[in-house]
Image (cartoon, rainbow, N blue to C red):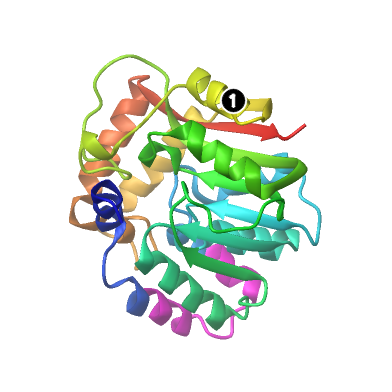
Amino acid sequence: MDPLNNMIARHYSRGSLGPTLLAALDERAGLPLGTLIEQLGAVDEFHVGGRAATQALADAMKLRPGQNILDIGCGLGGTARLLATRHNVRVTGIDLTAEYVEVGNNMNARLGLSGQIELVCGNALALPFAARGFDAATMLHVGMNIANKSALFGGIARTLKPGGKLAVYDIMRTGEGALSYPVPWASEASMSFVEARPFYRSALEAAGFAVYGEADRRELALTFLATVKARTGTAPALGLPLLMGDDAAQKLTNLSTQIEAGLIAPVQILAYLP
């Protein structure tokens, strides 16, 4: 793994997620699967807007039962679990952080979802999947850690069938000015590659995609972050601060301040292969 990827993987690794999350599942033993998936959303949907943002993305994609979905930057597998259980699809996830993949697969086994979801550790710029194997792909809060978005989207396009859809939900530039760190995706500027919508559109089109939908999720983000910040320090084990470490409060403050200032915002982009 190259030095930048090592830095990014260390940024996300906590080293103690497995015992904490598996214990949380044990405490909830006996609850219906849907209820468990909903409660896990507080921690395993590591992006602004959480479960609501994921469901909005899935609804916009109009997924069909039985489809094969690729989730790039799958983290702990929260998006994969929602798609698999609510939309009856099979999901393959890939993430650079080995801890996330190991813990996510253990959670899936505990929930009885291993037959429907597979998470693998790997690089989004070197996807280890056969060509034309997926009906659609999702990518939530991943591009901010990847500089070469043309290569990223080109690799994703290779894995999709003709007509395949790609749904992107990233933090994007909406104004000029230097960003303050740390933020949830980066402890310093050297691992942050935030770009504006036109940059994404150009990279997608260069990879052969046609963009058919865009939505700014600024207001959803501010409401979501206000709720998360209010719970920081007093929240139960299942919460995003668990994934952000000791400086979680500062990361959330910097993020919300810069969204409020109009520098950045989460944006949803939908594209397909003609």
Q: Residue at x 26, y 64 (%)?
A: 14
Residue drawn at (50%, 80%) of the image: 28
| Name of the residue lying farthest toward the top | 176
- Can residue 78 be seen from the camera position used here? yes
Q: Is residue 220 visible?
A: no
Does residue 88 appear to the left or right of 91 in the view shown? right
- Residue 129: horizontal and vertical position, in percent? 60, 58
Looking at the image, residue 186 lies above or below residue 193: below
On screen, 26 above or below 119?
Answer: below
Mark 1 nearby-residue class (10 Å; few <14, some 14–19, many ≥20): some
Residue drawn at 42 percent across, 19 percent down: 174
- Tag count in the figure? 1
Front-lying residue, 128 or 262: 128
Residue in the foreground of this view, choosing between 154 and 223: 154
Q: Name the image quarter holding the C terminus.
A: top right
**Residue 38 is inside the magenta segment:** yes
Q: Residue under circle 1?
A: 206
Highlighted magenta segment, given as a residue range: 21-39
Q: Which residue is at a point 33% across and 53% down the rendered structure image? A: 231
Q: Quadrant of the N terminus?
A: bottom left
Question: In what element is the residue under mark 1?
Answer: helix
Left or right of 249 in this view: 265: right
Q: Position of residue 2 (x, y in %)?
A: 28, 51
Amino acid type, mark 1: Ala
* Residue 213 is inside the magenta segment: no
